[in-house]
Amino acid sequence: MTERGEQMEMQAIDYRSTHDVPLEDVLILYKANGWSAAEKPELLHKALLNSETLISAWDGKTLVGLGNAISDGHLVVYYPHLLVLPAYHGRGVGREIMRCLRQHYEGFHQHMLIAEATAAQFYERLGFIRAGQTVPMWIYGGNEH
Ligand SMILES: CC(C)(COP(=O)(O)OP(=O)(O)OC[C@H]1O[C@@H](n2cnc3c(N)ncnc32)[C@H](O)[C@@H]1OP(=O)(O)O)[C@@H](O)C(=O)NCCC(=O)NCCS
């Protein structure tokens, strides 16, 4: 790889705690991961902008990861979405987004999420455990699970 190429590879990821995340970038990220929320673009964008906390990861002008949180503000926080651009998987982006999200809710009684089976080990590495004898339940409009 050229020296310039190495420098580009080494460019630091910028983590932002802002709701200024353009829909076109969001859609590229969601479609790259095959998530059905991309089929409802306006609602997806509103949902992200309306989330209590939204963390985005940027490599220059490329949105490479995103995670959101909704909360009652005191006891419980739920993390609905976390996804990283496939080309950036395994580089610590997901871990850093979750660290930023969790920081906002330090000391909360319950940090909850529903993990993809393929992502369960990732969350375990971040300290999450299976939720006792509970059973995740939902009414869901997608079909990718
Ligand atoms: C799951 C996901 C968010 C992880 O993000 P990532 O940036 O690739 O993960 P990181 O590089 O931060 O990995 C952190 C650690 O978890 C491990 N890890 C990452 N993905 C893993 C997986 N699918 N299975 C097992 N371990 C995994 C890494 O090896 C790393 O281990 P370490 O503690 O030894 O360093 C990302 O793979 C993704 O977007 N997947 C598709 C969407 C998805 O499934 N989202 C979760 C919805 S519940």
Image (tube, rainbow, N blue to C red):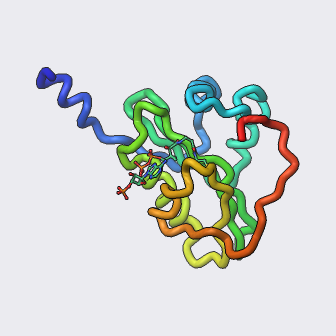
- Quarter-wise, where is residue 7 in the image? top left
Kindly identify the residue that appears in the image at 84 percent across and 44 percent down: 140
Q: Is residue 104 above or below residue 144?
A: below
Kindly identify the residue that appears in the image at 42 percent across and 46 percent down: 93
In this rendering, would 142 be left or right of 118? right
> Quick one: 135 or 127, which is closer to the camera?
135
> Quick one: 81 or 49, which is closer to the camera?
81
Can you name the residue that lies furthest to the left here? 3
Relative image position of residue 12 (x, y in whole percent): 30, 41
- Quarter-wise, where is residue 41 in the image? top right
Relative image position of residue 119 (x, y in whole percent): 55, 50
Relative image position of residue 115 (x, y in whole percent): 63, 54
Kindly identify the residue that appears in the image at 68 percent across and 56 percent down: 114
Q: Is residue 51 above or below residue 76?
A: above
Kindly identify the residue that appears in the image at 56 percent across and 27 percent down: 32
The quadrant of the image that shows the C terminus is top right
> Quick one: 130 or 104, which is closer to the camera?
130
Q: Is residue 31 above or below residue 73?
A: above
Can you name the residue that lies furthest to the right here? 139
In this rendering, would 92 be left or right of 130? left
Relative image position of residue 125 (x, y in whole percent): 45, 63
Q: Is residue 90 above or below residue 103?
A: above
